[in-house]
Image (cartoon, helix red, strand yellow):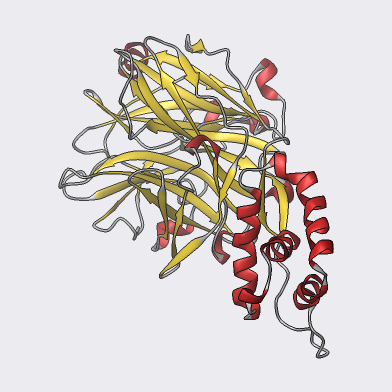
């Protein structure tokens, strides 16, 4: 096993972190010709006198206003959706009645009550005001709540100077980026509220293909051929029956575009994008057969055909299957790819391979032993015997690895790159 520096910080699932989300009831009238539940609730509120309506709203606010950010505005936004669906004459209703109607079609959701896991990390777009040697980062996390629905949460922090890591404090309120603009072909654009911090923002499923979860976002800072920088992330969209790979795109972590990917490779999970084009082509690392790692090339970032076999299980700790643990990291020596391996008793480990810088289909080196493996207190949790990351970061002479533990918490470790290169060269 490698000698790693482990940070004392540990993030855990937290049922106290809640957001207000839409509570969906079909707007259509009942099949027997009745008003339908939505219309019935709305008519009940409309019929209230203003004093009673204000009292009913006050009861709701007494329970929930201090638990959420801009609660009244959230209720008003939800009312606007109901108004559009029922074609209500909103100009005849008081603000209290509108907010009360909105409240009936919202609910409180604990987005990380069940699990917090599978982080990825990239440099933050804003690197201003830092001490020498420090780097501001953005970390994505897979949060799992009621109904095993996966969402994407974010945290901001600072690496360094040296092998140190600090997270910025979480805001008291989390906010859901819930409103989406349809862009066509299944793509949607969503916006973080202008007054909310990234560390308090949660991205929830928005489309039918995503309705049961956005899983395992693998973020990468991507430099296009023209020098434009964009933060991209591949993730798995799950609708309860089928999966597909999709792409998150952002330039500022305020506006996010979620784009379906097509092609044979996109029907699988666990795809990770190289941080730039190589030889005029986009490249991915992916697991197309559930067992081996493949190198996939494309002239389009949204279409991925069949790949070529890159890596098959070799050592005992990866005999069941191998996959990537995030986007390849460019070093002077080549492309460093963290891998996950599954061995006996479905025990997970994290290893590494080094690919040729100009021809990533060539494997230069491969670790015989894992960098990290489920052991001791890191074995128990929501899914035992799992360690897993969706992306590490080169930071000076260090590789910084945030990783999920037993699908229940997130830990952090540093490994010296020279130590890792030595192991890869001796393979």
Left or right: 190 with respect to 68? left
Question: Which residue is at a point 29% across and 41% down the rendered structure image?
Answer: 222
Q: How many marks?
A: 0
Q: Looking at this rendering, what residue extends furthest in the bottom direction?
A: 33
Confirm whether residue 370 shows in the render. Answer: no
Vertical order, 301 against 342 (above or below): below
Confirm whether residue 394 shows in the render. Answer: yes
Quadrant in the picture for residue 200? top right
Vertical order, 200 against 296 (above or below): above
Left or right: 361 with respect to 114? left
Quadrant in the picture for residue 285? top left
Left or right: 379 with respect to 167? right
In the rendered image, residue 280, in percent from the top left (x then y), is placed at 17, 49
Image quadrant holding the C terminus, namely: top left
Vertical order, 170 against 306 (above or below): above
Q: In terms of depth relative to the viewer, which is nearer, 17 or 193?
A: 193
In the rendered image, residue 367, in percent from the top left (x then y), is placed at 41, 22
Q: In terms of depth relative to the viewer, which is nearer, 306 or 83?
A: 83
Question: Which residue is at a point 56% across and 59% down the rendered structure image?
Answer: 210
Question: Which residue is at a point 21% across and 50% down the rendered structure image?
Answer: 281
Q: In terms of depth relative to the viewer, which is nearer, 85 or 244?
A: 85
In the rendered image, residue 389, in percent from the top left (x then y), is placed at 50, 32
In the rendered image, residue 241, in percent from the top left (x then y), is placed at 63, 62
Vertical order, 254 against 239 (above or below): above
């Amino acid at each position: 096993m490698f000698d790693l520096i482990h940070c004392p910080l540990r993030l855990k699932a937290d049922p106290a972190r809640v957001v207000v989300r839409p509570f969906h009831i079909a707007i259509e009238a009942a099949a027997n010709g009745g008003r339908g539940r939505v219309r019935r609730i709305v008519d009940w509120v409309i019929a209230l006198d203003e004093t009673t309506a204000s009292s009913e709203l006050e009861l709701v606010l007494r329970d929930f206003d201090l638990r959420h950010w801009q609660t009244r505005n959230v209720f008003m936004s939800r009312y606007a959706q109901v108004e559009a669906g029922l074609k209500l004459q909103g100009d005849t209703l008081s603000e209290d009645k509108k907010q009360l109607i909105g409240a009936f079609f919202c609910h409180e959701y604990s987005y990380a009550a069940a699990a917090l896991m599978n982080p990825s990390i990239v440099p933050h777009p804003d690197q201003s005001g830092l001490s020498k040697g420090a780097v501001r980062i953005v970390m994505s996390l897979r949060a799992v709540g009621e109904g095993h629905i996966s969402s994407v949460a974010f945290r901001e922090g600072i690496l360094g100077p040296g092998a140190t890591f600090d997270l910025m404090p979480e805001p008291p309120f989390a906010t859901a980026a819930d409103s989406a603009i349809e862009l066509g072909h299944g793509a949607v654009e969503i916006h973080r509220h202008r007054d909310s911090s990234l560390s308090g923002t949660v991205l929830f499923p928005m489309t039918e293909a995503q309705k049961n979860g956005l899983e395992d976002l693998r973020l990468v800072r991507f430099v296009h051929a023209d020098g434009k920088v964009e933060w991209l992330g591949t993730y798995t969209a799950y609708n309860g029956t089928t999966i597909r790979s999709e792409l998150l795109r952002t330039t500022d972590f305020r506006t996010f575009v979620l784009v379906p990917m097509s092609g044979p490779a996109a029907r699988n999970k666990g795809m990770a994008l190289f941080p730039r084009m190589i030889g005029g082509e986009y490249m991915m690392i992916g697991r197309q057969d559930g067992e081996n790692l493949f190198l996939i090339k494309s002239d389009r970032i949204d279409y991925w055909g069949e790949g070529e076999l890159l890596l098959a299980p070799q050592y005992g700790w990866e005999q069941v299957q191998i996959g990537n643990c995030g986007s390849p990291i460019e070093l002077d020596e080549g492309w460093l790819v963290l891998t996950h391996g599954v061995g006996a008793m479905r025990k997970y480990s994290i290893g590494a391979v080094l690919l040729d810088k100009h021809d990533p289909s060539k494997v230069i080196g491969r670790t015989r032993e894992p960098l990290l493996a489920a052991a001791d207190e890191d074995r128990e949790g929501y899914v035992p015997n799992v360690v897993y990351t969706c992306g590490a970061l080169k930071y000076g002479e260090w590789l910084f690895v945030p990783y999920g533990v037993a699908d229940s918490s997130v830990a952090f470790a540093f490994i010296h790159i020279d130590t890792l290169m030595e192991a890869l060269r001796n393979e």
